[in-house]
């Protein structure tokens, strides 16, 4: 159980890091929306959001396992 709890804490921390990264990329893209970097940031945000969905699914799975114990 401790193993899953620490894994859950790691996943939650990673979700927070991804959220921060997405916010930073979006802020950078808003500074100069017509730049090539802004276009790349837009694609990076999409990728980070897909990764975040996987992390949330993992978090939910771990929560379900912990509540079953």
Image (cartoon, helix red, strand yellow):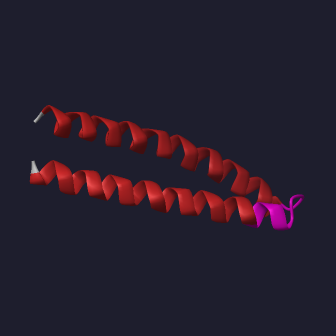
Whole-percent x, y for residue 39 in the image: 78, 54
| Quadrant in which the C terminus appears | top left
Does residue 20 appear left or right of residue 65 in this picture?
right
Whole-percent x, y for residue 33 in the image: 86, 59
Whole-percent x, y for residue 66 in the image: 18, 40
Identify the residue shown where x is 20% and y is 57%: 6
State whether residue 53 is above or below residue 36.
above
52 part of magenta stretch: no
- Residue span colored magenta: 28-35
Nearer the observer, 25 or 20: 20
Nearer the observer, 35 or 16: 16
Does residue 4 appear left or right of residue 55 in this picture?
left
Identify the residue shown where x is 56% and y is 45%: 49
State whether residue 10 is above or below residue 63.
below
How many numbered marks does the figure carry?
0
Identify the residue shown where x is 11% and y is 54%: 2
30 part of magenta stretch: yes
Identify the residue shown where x is 41% and y is 41%: 56
Check the image and name the residue furthest to the right.
34
Q: Quadrant of residue 13?
A: bottom left
């Amino acid at each position: 159980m401790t193993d899953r709890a620490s894994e859950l804490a790691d996943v939650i921390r990673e979700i927070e890091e991804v959220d921060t990264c997405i916010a930073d990329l979006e802020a950078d893209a808003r500074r100069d929306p017509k730049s090539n970097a802004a276009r790349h940031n837009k694609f990076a945000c999409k990728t980070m959001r897909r990764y975040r969905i996987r992390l949330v699914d993992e978090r939910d799975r771990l929560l379900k396992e912990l509540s079953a114990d």
